[in-house]
Image (cartoon, helix red, strand yellow):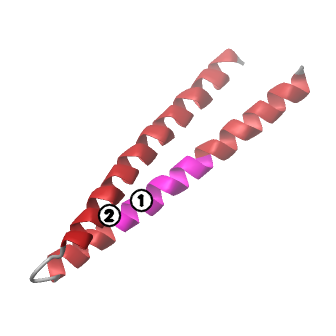
């Protein structure tokens, strides 16, 4: 039973780290695309499309991060 708990804790911690990394990566992508959009005098539709897609991915990664954090908190409270 304890081995299964340790494996589950390890998996949750790994998911938490990966979710945090995805948030940082998505943040950087959105910032980079906003800078590119601001610098161009005539923004193309592809830049706008990539920006919207990056923002959508960013919000999804934030939700995943929050969910992982919540699961980790619940696991800590159980112990």
Q: Quarter holding the C terminus?
A: top right
Q: Determine the residue positioned at 54% across, 34% down.
A: 69
Q: Which residue is drawn at 54% across and 48% down?
A: 19
In three-dimensional space, the C-alpha distance between marks 2 and 1, rounded to whole angstroms, equals: 6 Å
The answer to whether marks 2 and 1 mark residues whose Cβ atoms lie closer than 8 Å is: yes
Q: Mark 2 points at which residue?
A: 30
Residue 63 shown in magenta: no
Q: Is residue 27 magenta?
A: yes
Residue 56 placement (x, y as % from top left): 34, 50
Left or right of residue 4: residue 38: left
Task: Decide which of 3, 26 is in the foreground and name it.
Answer: 26
Tell me the crowding category of disc 1: few under 14, some 14 to 19, or many 20 or more residues within 10 angstroms, Cα based. many
User: Between residues 29 and 13, which one lies in front from this camera angle?
Assistant: 29
64 vs 45, left or right, is right
Which dot marks residue 26? 1
Quadrant for the N terminus in the image: top right
Q: Is residue 22 above or below residue 38?
A: above
The stretch in magenta equals 17-30
Figure quadrant of residue 11: top right
């Amino acid at each position: 039973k304890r081995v299964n708990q340790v494996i589950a804790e390890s998996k949750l911690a790994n998911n938490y780290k990966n979710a945090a990394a995805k948030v940082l990566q998505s943040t950087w992508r959105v910032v980079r695309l906003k800078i590119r959009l601001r610098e161009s005098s005539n923004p193309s539709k592809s830049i706008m499309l990539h920006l919207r897609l990056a923002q959508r991915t960013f919000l999804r990664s934030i939700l995943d991060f929050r969910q992982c954090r919540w699961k980790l908190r619940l696991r800590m409270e159980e112990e």
